[in-house]
Amino acid sequence: MSAHDPTDRSLDYETEAVQVGIPRGLGDGVGIPIHQIIAFQFETLEQGASEFQLNSGYSYARLQNPTVKTLEERLTALEGGAATVALSTGQAATFTAILSVCRAGDHIVATSSLFGGTAGLLGNILPLMGVTASMVANTPEAIRAAMQPNTRLVWAETIGNPAADIADIASFADIAHAAGALLGIDNTWGGVGYLCRPLSHGADMVTHSLTKWAGGHGSVMGGSVTVGSGHDLSRNPIYSGGGENSLLVTRGDSALAWRQRWLGAHQLGMTLAPNSAFLIAQGLETLSLRLSRESETALSLATFLEAHEAVSGVAYPGLESSPYHALAGTYLKGGYGAVLTFEVQDPAPFLAALEVIRMAPNLGDTRTLVVHPWTTTHGRLPEAARRAAGVTPHTIRMSVGVESQGDLKRDLGQALRVGQAAKRTEELAR
């Protein structure tokens, strides 16, 4: 299923994923070459000076590389954006996106159901820089109530990690924009625009951990920030301050994208290697095939688990029982995603009994992976923050791969039986 509006005359998602960035012409390769090059030549002093001022071409690989640029062009097309900077990790992308609009004294409103690394960044690192954050429920009412005069950014995830709750993107955008702030969405679970394009719903920028569904095979790390067009930065002093020398005057509509590349790549050096860019671009070419199959399997497994007596709860937006099912119908167009969470009485024997499904802290792999967030991805957060993120001691997060549905169901079934038997043995021993 295409994630595009059928009335849109642009190329469909699947076509853009394999075509964007590849030139047409005699002798051109049908694919993306790896440019393992650090420095690029100038012919004149004037060329060098211009390039270092404008950064419109190539000078030094920390700033730009042809392989990385091709990946950025493809990401921009798939998200329906205006510009993208690709970086070394998803965490680097989140850090860059936030710092592109925030400085000491500024404030962020973020939903509490976030990836543990993002929550740690908001709670541990940004306060060292004088940036504060309010973590609130994933509702428009909670977002609106938490806004302050110095709020520069509202932050949420398309599908919360691991709570599987859906952000009301359009409502969040309205609230942010009314206050002169921007809306940033971590769209990692949205599959690089395949399931959701937040920019089309009013978001100003989207980030990705390209390590996940973009790369898709658990073999490469990367991150990206894509900005849309039409964002209003006039009330942000980072951009409006300085009079005729302000970023809005000197950089115009490209100010936000320029600052993100300057921050993430030029100043902080969180550069994506060309080999990694190549692998991620390869992964994008099959993302729609993988994620459509994985979403179909995830819905089947969620239905299976919801009916199982050893499972006390399942969180998956594709289930009609999910309180986010209606929002999922509004924002998710290519499926309901490849991740679900469920509750078991005793996670330890269940996890130890799995024979096909592997226990590992990644998402978007071709292999189905499970993890116990309470002790791993969210383990360093205070207990209240873990519970606010939808994590309990009984929670299992599962990222569904491309294996046979039947094999996965059988593996889950036998592991749940082992868990039940272990629980009964423990109760008899008391």
Image: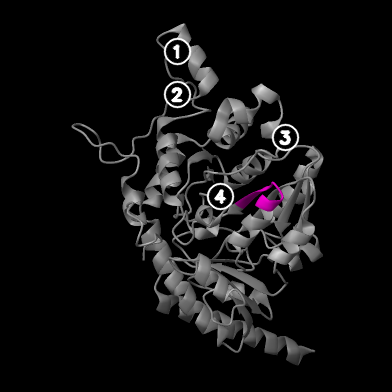
Residue type beneath disc 4: Val
Marker disc for residue 397: none
Find out whether the residues at labels 3 and 4 contact each other: C-beta distance under 8 Å. Answer: no
Q: What residue sits 51% from the left and 13% below the top?
A: 49
Residue type beneath disc 1: Gln
The mark closer to the camera, 2 or 3, is 3
Q: Which residues are magenta?
A: 177-184
Q: Secondary structure at mark 4?
A: strand
In the picture, measured across the screen, residue 359 lies left or right of residue 13, that is right
Q: Is residue 65 visible?
A: yes
Q: Position of residue 178 (x, y in %)?
A: 68, 52
Membership of 179 in magenta stretch: yes
Q: Which residue is mark 2?
A: 58
In the picture, measured across the screen, residue 132 lies left or right of residue 229, that is right
Tell me which numbered mark, 4 or 1, is placed earlier along the sequence.
1
Between 158 and 420, the one lying in front of the other is 158
